Image (cartoon, rainbow, N blue to C red):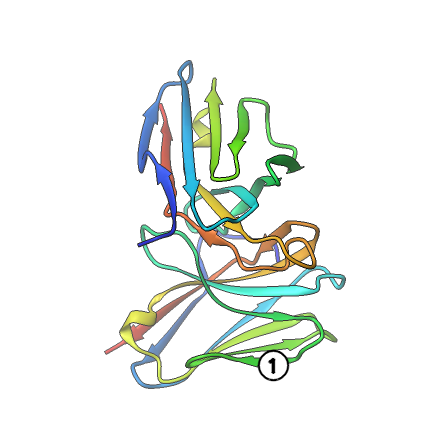
Amino acid sequence: DTEVTQTPKHLVMGMTNKKSLKCEQHMGHRAMYWYKQKAKKPPELMFVYSYEKLSINESVPSRFSPECPNSSLLNLHLHALQPEDSALYLCASSPISGTPGAQPQHFGDGTRLSIL
Amino acid sequence: GESVGLHLPTLSVQEGDNSIINCAYSNSASDYFIWYKQESGKGPQFIIDIRSNMDKRQGQRVTVLLNKTVKHLSLQIAATQPGDSAVYFCAENTGGFKTIFGAGTRLFVKA
């Protein structure tokens, strides 16, 4: 079983809907990540939070809005998505020690998102 | 590296043989490298990592080799088993928390 829990596992939404993806970890990790993965492609970094503050936004469209309400939770709020946003959305966490980012990331199993 | 094309590179090996998966990374300043395994329907799973001050690191049945001169990383899996069938990604940390994944290689293990 993965130590990073993502809900829901699957989500189908229309282009005018608002929904949220949730991610939770209880490993005490203070860095949390959102990735987008299209079929047969590698994960692409979207956002990174460190100590609950946004550290990296990889020029992600504003229809994706991340939130880190506490050290265990990470949300991704979705609004007015496009069909090309259909993908697997992965959450990951890692400890922070020494050089930032130089620790392996623990991934959840993702939310498979389909935009109609 | 950049992911191109519609099809993942594929490596097919016989059960019990050794597997070698290669990766070219993009940033000469990257100082931390990781191999992940992704099975169908799952998220990537950490296998082994290596820092730029090393050129070889061994784990249980896996070895990672790093050649900084040519920006090349390889993963060796000894005595490959059917459970090793998956997509394998190399990843590089390019500074701060930024991690870039390589294109991936699909490993098929024939029984």
Figure quadrant of residue A25: top left
x and y, in percent, of residue A42 in the image: 50, 52
Question: Where A9 sits versus A62, above or below?
Answer: below
Could you say which is closer to the camera, residue A58 or residue B105?
A: A58
B5 sits left or right of A50 in the view: left
Could you say where residue A60 lies in the image, as x and y percent from the top left? 60, 31
Asked if B65 appears above or below B93 in the picture, the reply is below
Q: Position of residue B68 (x, y in %)?
A: 71, 73
For image coordinates 69% across by 70% down, the residue present is B71
Q: Secondary structure at mark 1?
A: strand
Number of numbered discs:
1
Q: Quarter of the image containing the N terminus of chain A?
A: bottom left
Which residue extends farthest left?
B111
Q: Chain of mark 1?
A: B
**Residue underneath mark 1:** B56
Q: Residues within 10 Å of mark 1 (few under 14, many from 20)?
A: some
Q: What amino acid is at disc 1?
A: Lys
A105 or B108: nearer the eye? A105
With A32 as the anchor, is B27 left or right in this view? right
- Quadrant of residue B22 within the rendered picture: bottom right
Up-down: is A41 above or below A82? Answer: below
Q: Nearer the viewer, residue A91 or A12?
A: A91
Compared across the picture, whether A13 is left or right of B29 comes to: left
Residue pictured at 54% horizontal, 25% vertical: A65
Determine the image quadrant of residue B70. bottom right
Q: Quadrant of the C terminus of chain A?
A: top left
- Name the residue located 74 percent from the left edge and 75 percent from the top edge: B69
Among all residues in the image, which is located at the extreme top?
A: A16
Residue appearing at x 46%, y 43% in the figure: A91
* Residue B51 position within the rendered picture, expressed as x and y whole percent measured from the top left: 65, 70
